[in-house]
Image (cartoon, rainbow, N blue to C red):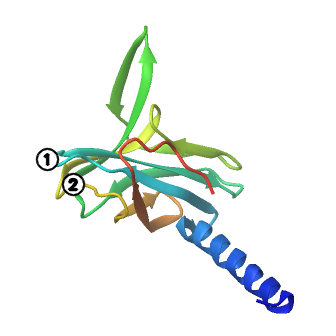
């Protein structure tokens, strides 16, 4: 391939790669959701967690108040924490999103709990979630299913 063709082809490939990297970013009003993912589950598993970053780029506070998905019978916002050397997990009524702040939903902290899964989550699949915010309204996102042991990923 000649140099005059190779450079534009390389630039196009880089642009397409960047576009794919940002394909999992979502915006509603001043709220930006990035990197939503879940881990694959073994056959027969009935629960899974989903994770993402939510950034409030606005000047007003907002609140994540609910999440639903056709992939699970029950979807809840949970928080894991260490209490006296013991890890605890409990449902929360919502997550406050302060202006200019980012909240990480990650393993070991806030996360989306998917209970009564309709089918196991398989690596490469995508599951829909509907996030509802107090002020910004609803945002539908697709959560990419990663390998079983996947850690949080960034683009």
Query: Does residue 64 appear left or right of residue 92 in this picture?
Result: right
> Which residue of the protein is positioned furthest toward the top in this rendering?
84
> Which residue of the protein is positioned furthest toward the right in this rendering?
4
> Which residue of the protein is positioned furthest toward the left in this rendering?
44
Coordinates of residue 149 in the picture (x, y in percent)? 40, 41
Coordinates of residue 96 in the picture (x, y in percent)? 53, 43
Coordinates of residue 73 in the picture (x, y in percent)? 18, 54
Q: Secondary structure at mark 1?
A: loop
- The crowding category of the residue bearing disc 1, from other C-alpha atoms within 10 Å (few below 14, some 14 to 19, many at least 20), is few
Vertical side of 135 occupied by 39: above or below: above
Vertical side of 13 occupied by 88: above or below: above
Query: Which sits in the foreground, 56 or 3?
Result: 3
Sequence-wise first label, 1 or 2:
1
Query: Does residue 86 appear left or right of residue 29 in this picture?
Result: left
Query: Does residue 72 appear left or right of residue 103 in this picture?
Result: left
Q: Secondary structure at mark 2?
A: loop
> Which residue of the protein is positioned furthest toward the front in this rendering?
1
- Label 1 with label 2: CB-CB less than 8 Å: yes
Query: Does residue 33 appear left or right of residue 50 in this picture?
Result: right
- The crowding category of the residue bearing disc 2, from other C-alpha atoms within 10 Å (few below 14, some 14 to 19, many at least 20), is some
Question: Residue at position x 72%, y 55% from top?
Answer: 59
Question: Residue at position x 38%, y 19% from top?
Answer: 87
Question: Residue at position x 61%, y 68% from top?
Answer: 22
**Which residue is disc 1 drawn over?**
44
Vertical side of 129 occupied by 54: above or below: above
**Which residue is disc 2 drawn over?**
120
Q: Quadrant of residue 16?
A: bottom right
Q: Which label was assigned to residue 62?
A: none
């Amino acid at each position: 391939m000649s140099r005059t063709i190779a450079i534009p082809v390389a630039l196009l490939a880089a642009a397409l790669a960047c576009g794919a990297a940002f394909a999992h970013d979502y915006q509603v009003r001043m709220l930006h959701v990035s990197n939503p993912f879940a881990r694959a589950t073994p056959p027969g598993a009935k629960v899974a967690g989903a994770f993402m970053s939510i950034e409030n780029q606005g000047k007003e506070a907002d609140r994540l108040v609910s999440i639903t998905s056709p992939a699970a019978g029950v979807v809840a916002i949970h928080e894991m924490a260490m209490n006296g050397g013991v890890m605890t997990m409990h449902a929360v009524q919502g997550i406050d999103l302060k202006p200019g702040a980012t909240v990480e939903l990650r393993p070991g902290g806030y996360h989306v709990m998917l209970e009564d899964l309709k089918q196991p989550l398989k690596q490469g699949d995508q599951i829909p979630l509907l996030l509802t915010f107090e002020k910004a309204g609803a945002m539908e996102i697709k959560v990419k299913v990663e390998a079983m042991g996947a850690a949080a990923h960034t683009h």
